[in-house]
Amino acid sequence: MKLYINSVGIISPSLQASGEWQLPRVDENYLTCIEPDYTQWIQPQQLRRMSRIMKMGTTAALMAVKTGASKPDAIIAGTAYGCLEDTATFLTKIIELNEEALNPTPFMQSTHNTIAAQIALLQNCQGYNQTYVHGAFSFEHALLDAGMLLTDTPAQTILTGGVDELTKAGHAIHSRFNKYRKQNTPYLISPAGDGTWAGEGAAFFMLSGANESTVAIADVHTFMASSSEQAFQQLDNFLKQNQLDTDAIDFLLTGKNGDQKNDLFYDQLIDVRFSDQAFGAYKHLCGEYSTSTAFATALAYTILKHQTVPVSVLNGSLNTPIKTLLIYNTYGPHHSLILLTV
Amino acid sequence: MEQLMADLKVQIIEALNLKHLKPEDIGDDQPLFIEGLGLDSIDALELIVLLQQKHNTKIANAQDGPKIFKSVRSIAEYVRANQAAA
C-alpha cells in the first residue's frame, strides 16, 4: 500500500515549511528549531496554555492541513518522549510543593497523546486518533498504522507525523550517557568524532491512498539488529519484497549522526551494499532525536519533488532522475527503512 | 486591599500566561469568566492553585467558586476574609 504525500508541514532547525532552508544554529552540542510566529496559526487564547512541543507539533500539523486539499479523516502521531517540558514541570512541582496544590495545566499536558488530541480539537476531527510511543520507531509505527488504515479505505486522508522536543532536563539526562559532543565543532558528519548533536523537530504529512501526488512512501520496515550482517539481511529481504535491489536505489539518505561509533555501520553499509549509489546524510540539519526520520521523510519529499539534493546533504555525485529513495536510520540497535518513490 | 488586588492581577497574568494583558488592563470589578477576560474551567483550577500557593487560602466549598472568582475584587475580598479568619 503506497502512502501518497499530499502535503508536508515542518518545523525544524533548518528546513522550513515553505521549502526554504536556513542555516541551523549550533549551541554547544544541540540544534533547536526555528520557530514560526505561532499566532499566525493558533488563536492567542488557545496558544497561551500550550507548551513549546504542543505549539511545534500542532502548528506543523496545521501547516500540512492548510497546504493539503482536504481535512484529515484521522490523526496519527509518533513521539518518543511526548511533552517532556510539561512532564518535568509537573514532577518538579510535586517535589517542591510536597504533592499539594499542583497546577493542572502541566499535568494534563504531560501525556504523550496531548499533541494529537489538540490537533483533533483544532481541526474538529472526531475520527481515529492515535499516538505511538515506541522510542526510535515511534514515527515509523505511525506510518505503518496509517498504511493499514489506508489499505482499508484508500480514499481517506490521514494526518501523520513525528515530533519530539529538546529540553534542558532531557538534554542533561541524555548527556550522562556520553551521547553528545563535549567540544564545539563546526561540522558534525565529516569528520566524525565522539558523540553527536542533540536535536528536535516536528513534521506532519497529509497521506492518502489515492494517487493525488506523485511522491509516495512505498514501504516502511523496522527491526532490531545486533550485527551488521543481521541488518544487511533485513535490508536485502526488504528490497526483495519490494522487487528491488540496491542498484535500483537512486539515493540513500543515511542517519549518520557524526558519532564515529555509530557511523561505522553506515560506512560498512555503503561499502558493502551501496558502493555505486549516491548517498547523503541529514542529522547535521536537525540533530539526533528519536523521531528524526520524520525530518528525513520531509527532506526526502522535497528531494523527490524538486529532483535536487541540497549540497549540504549530498555526499559525492548524483545521477538524476531520482525515482527511488531509501532512508536508512539506526538509533542504537533500532534500525528503520523508509522507501519513497516518485 | 488595593495592594492585594494589584498583586492578584500580576499573579493572574503570570499564572494564566495572559501575555497580551497588563495589570492595568484588568478592571477591579471586571468579570473574569466567559465575558470579560474569557477564562474557562481550567483557568478556574489554576486560580484555586494560585490562591493556595501564593496566599495560603483554600476554597472550602466548591459551590462558592463562581461567587469568589467573579472579579479581582471578589477574589481579594475572599482572600482578606479568609486570612482574617485564619
Image: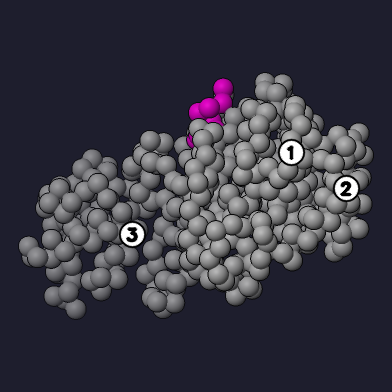
Residue A62 percent across, percent down from the top left:
50, 35
Q: Please state which of residues A261 and A142 is positioned toward the viewer in this rendering.
A: A261
Q: Which residue is mark 1?
A: A317
Q: Residue at x 18, y 57 (%)?
A: B9
**Whole-Å distance between the Cαs marked 3 and 2?**
58 Å
Is the residue under label 2 in contact with that under label 3 (CB below 8 Å)?
Answer: no
Q: Please state which of residues B66 and A63 is positioned toward the viewer in this rendering.
A: A63
Task: Judge left or right: residue A304 versus residue A275.
Answer: left
Give, as a single range, the part of the protein colored magenta.
A61-69
Protein image colouring: one colour
Which amino acid type is marked by label 2?
A: Arg
Same chain under badges 3 and 1? The reply is: no
Which amino acid type is marked by label 1?
A: Ser
Residue A297 forms part of the magenta stretch: no
Q: Which residue is mark 2?
A: A273
Same chain under badges 3 and 2? The reply is: no
- SS at badge 3: helix
Majority secondary structure of magenta residues: helix
